[in-house]
Amino acid sequence: KEGFDTFFKATELAKQNKQQSQEITELKVQLSTLKEIANENQQLRDQLKFNEQMQFEITAARVVSAEGTSLRKFITIDRGKSSGISQGMAVISAGVLVGTIDQVEDYSAKVFLATDPEFRIRGLGQDGRAQGIVSGQLGQGYLFDKITQTETITSGESVITSGSGLVPKGILVGQVESVQKSDNAVFQSAQLRPLVDFDKLDVVFVVTGFKK
């Protein structure tokens, strides 16, 4: 009988351990979910704070996948035509440009990232008002090019979108790290530092228009 009691107690203990292990796993899942919700809520708060200043109409979207090759970079979001998303609209994170909408389905869309070497958008120096073209450079930030020699662009200056197509004026693109200027060249250029971490995008915002 003593051996049976020992076996019974061991069996019960194993069941309890298994149940506790399941409960711990469930708690970990709940904690992980709460952390994700907290992260998304913080991103929403950051964006809403920015949007109070810019007065954009925005639609929040979750990033469902990141894809691409060594040359082309895209992310896919869970919003599409059914949410009023159109090709060419700007996509931002905390007020900083992420890219533009490239392909749109009914309930999803592909975002053409600003870091892609094929990406182009008109930029404007916020201090000296220099105008040029911002293009992506994989692993090297952005190139702010086609700036005439008569214009002024300085290190540390912020560069914003100048407004073109469905992309409104005033979205922050990056910050000038260095300026390349030659007396014999027609244009000068600048290297820009991106102000968004493209590897940590969970929630982004599509600019669908201006608040009336």
Image (cartoon, helix red, strand yellow):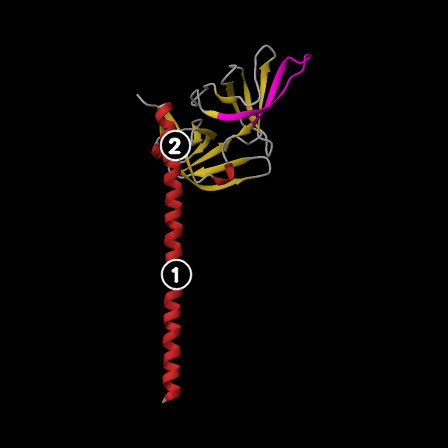
Highlighted magenta segment, given as a residue range: 173-192
Q: Secondary structure at mark 1?
A: helix
Viewer-nearest residue: 162 or 75: 162
Q: Secondary structure at mark 2?
A: helix
Query: Depth check: 173 or 10 in front?
Result: 10
- Does the stretch in magenta take in 182? yes
* Drawn side of residue 83 relative to residue 185, left or right: left
Q: Which residue is mark 1?
A: 24
Q: Is residue 153 visible?
A: yes
Magenta stretch contains residue 151: no
User: As drawn, is 76 to the left or to the right of 81?
Assistant: right
Magenta: main secondary structure: strand
Instruction: Tell me how far mark 2 sits from mark 1, CA to CA.
Output: 35 Å
What is the x, y in percent for residue 131?
Answer: 53, 16
Report the quarter where the C terminus lies: top left
Say which label, 2 or 1, has the lower sequence index.
Answer: 1
Q: Tell me what residue is drawn at x 36 percent, y 30 percent.
A: 49
Residue named by callout 2: 47
At horizontal 38% and vertical 38% (from top left) the residue drawn is 42
Q: How many residues crowd mark 2 within 10 Å: few (<14), some (14–19), many (20+)?
A: many
User: Residue 138 placed where, x, y %?
Assistant: 59, 33
In the orientation shown, which residue stands out farthest toward the right? 184
Q: What is the quadrant of the N terminus in the image? A: bottom left
Identify the disc placed on residue 98.
none
User: What residue is rendered at 59% in x and 20% in y?
Assistant: 145
Inspect the image, locate mark 2, and give the three-letter code of the amino acid beneath it. Answer: Gln
Cβ–Cβ under 8 Å for marks 2 and 1: no
Q: In the image, residue 94 lies at what x, y percent?
A: 42, 32
Residue 16: percent from left, percent from top:
36, 71
Q: Is residue 79 visible?
A: no
Q: Amino acid at mark 1?
A: Ile
Which quadrant of the structure image shows residue 133?
A: top right
